[in-house]
Amino acid sequence: MTSMSLPPGTAPIKRQFLLSSDALPAVDDDAAEGSTTHTGTSRVDVADTDTRGTGGRKKWTKAQKKEKRGANKGRKFDKVHDQLELCWRVANGKICEHGDECRFTHDIDAYLAAKPRDIRFPSIASISDVPPFIIGMDEDNSTANDNLSSPEHHTSCPSFAESGFCRLGLKCRFLGAHAKRDASGAIMLVEDEEKRAHTALSTTELNFVSADTLKLLRSKKYPKPITDAYLKELEAAKEDSNVTEEDVALGEDNLAIQDDTLPISSELIAKRTGNSDPSAQTDTPDVLIRVQEKRRLNWSGKSYLAPLTTVGNLPFRRLCMTLGADITCGEMGLATSFLSASASEFSLVRRHPSESIFGAQVAGNKPSTLVPTAEVLGREFGDAGGIDFVDVNCGCPIDLVFKSGSGSALLDAPAKLGKIVTGMSRALGEIPVTIKLRTGVKDGRNNAHKVMLRAATEWGVGCITLHGRTRQQRYTKLADWEYIKYCVDAVRAREADKGLSPIPIFGGGDCFSSHDYWTNVSSTGVDGIMIGRGALIKPWIFTEVKERREWDISSRERLQLIGKFTEFGLSHFGTDTTGVNTTRRFLCEALSFQYRYVPIGLLERLPAKINDRAPTFKGRDELGMCFIIETLLASPNSQDWVKISEMFLGPAPESWSFTPKHKSNAHGEESQG
């Protein structure tokens, strides 16, 4: 029996699984994308820097604050702490130098008496297809003291299991896995020295910024010689009456873009890529890297996880790596925030060793902020294992990002963009600069091909990614892959004319299956596809792409991936009360996208489409009671996402709440855990 009665744009679910033919409300991915940062504040708040270029925030008027309320424009997530907070030094068996003046308690027995009982973190083998799905997920009201005297209450600490020690010590909510009482009743913390030594390099996160670096940035004493020289060069060129503003900008609008036959001299190319006579730099301590000497990005055939606001954090990227992703990029960071020494902004460049190719993405609106940011990133993280590339965001469509001259606004300012990319390329040395674009700003006025030609042949970028929609379209229309092909063909022809080695070009937009991926690769000539929303809804898309198949993933397998994400989150955010509930928050963020996945075994035809809205449906009953969990995983109710988190992280505290990025998914004003 078919489902021809379903309205257009509705997922074609087989009739036996339908509970209602009414499709769920459409979600606003654009609003969600701009609503919240990794820190829990509104991204539009932090993007709206002042017009004087000082990096400060505008002060909102009372009317502006009122206008911004509602619709998730400023979600806040307060940290959850222990009822009685133990000094972290004492928690790790060390002596606190503050003694009695320490603001945290040193009374271990009192702390353990108040601390809740350990959480039982489930192993993959304990996940089943029948209720309660997670074996041993029951809880009682006993305390942490009971964990050390009741061997039957065994738990596993993800950090200890991975690296052989737990940095949270007694504060860990999985304490029983690495602590015990000796004959005298004293608590002993356990370490696995062999595992700790064996896994030191494979588990330790990379790209930590030092306190000294932050201090220098705050005091504006951080040395930036390349930036200083470059900005002086631009300023001097402006004052030279014999050089036009457009020429200084390293890319006038009339430069061989409209006329493909206009030759570009080697001197002009050298000038516009920042390549001067190398002999003149022989005795200079900081010799500039020529574009030809930069690291080549051999990315053909590789899959690329897009930089994703909020959800694209280190645990999620790590999960995608286990599922087959090749290239990852941190969440978009603001140049002004890096320069003002924001610790939360620097956390965006944190890298896990499993991320084999990793880059940082930055956004800004002028060379005076983006070039020094590039120099700081290159100096701090330029060694092997730091960052492999720095991406300039030229595609963010959010209103206040756009209105500040950042993101997709740079598409209409190619002269400025040329200054930015060329300066960043100089400042980064061997590290390549990449750019991510949209097709244009307004519908019917695509200009990405012009920007791409200049970027590939003059500015020396290492890779170009083109999202197949304009800024005006946001996600309301299908990606224009025909225009992406046009741009690829134009760039390849220009590279051949100039005798330049081709750079990787990635496309993006609406990729939701292996079929989508390989069809668009073969029809457009792109080197690969950057996957964003497709990975948010089904992270296993990278496995599908690698194996060139559609994966009818089971509910048990999906729960296992949720468990793995939870494990990675605890390793990253910490296993104490604060870390557990931070992990819970980001798990719910991930589930706010994953619930939109419709199991392909329920569909009448393939491939599934990313923009199809699902009617309410029930899961399959092929393995006893597994339909319950498959149905639960498809719930749009954020309270159900909290229930799923409790399978792995124990009951949510009464003080903890979760408000989704997509407001329509919140039942009531606020979802309470």
Image: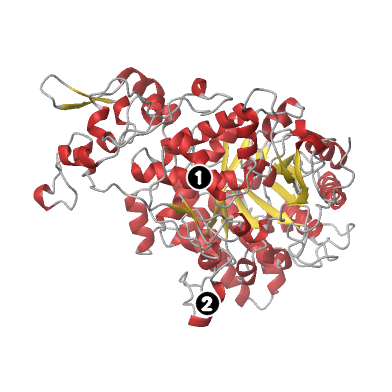
Nearer-N-terminus badge (2/1): 2
Q: Is residue 202 left or right of residue 170?
A: right
Residue 596 screen position, x and y as percent = 68, 44
Q: CA distance from mark 2 to mark 1?
A: 30 Å
Give the quadrant of the N terminus.
top right
Q: Which mark is residue 66?
A: 2
Q: Residue sitting at 45 percent across and 53 percent down?
A: 657
Q: Is residue 83 above or below residue 53?
A: above
Mark 2 touching mark 1, by CB under 8 A?
A: no
Amino acid type, callout 1: Val
Pick whichever, 504 or 270, lies toward us: 504
Secondary structure state at the residue bearing disc 1? helix
Q: Nearer the viewer, residue 299 or 664?
A: 664
The residue beneath circle 1 is 642
Above or below — where is 179 with respect to 349?
above
Nearer to us: label 2 or label 1: 1
User: x, y percentage for residue 82?
Assistant: 29, 46
Badge 2 marks a residue whose secondary structure is helix
Q: Is residue 629 above or below residue 20?
A: above
Quick one: 282 or 120, which is closer to the camera?
120
Residue visible at 62% across and 74% down?
238
Q: Amino acid at mark 2?
A: Lys
Q: Is residue 284 in sight in this rendering? A: no
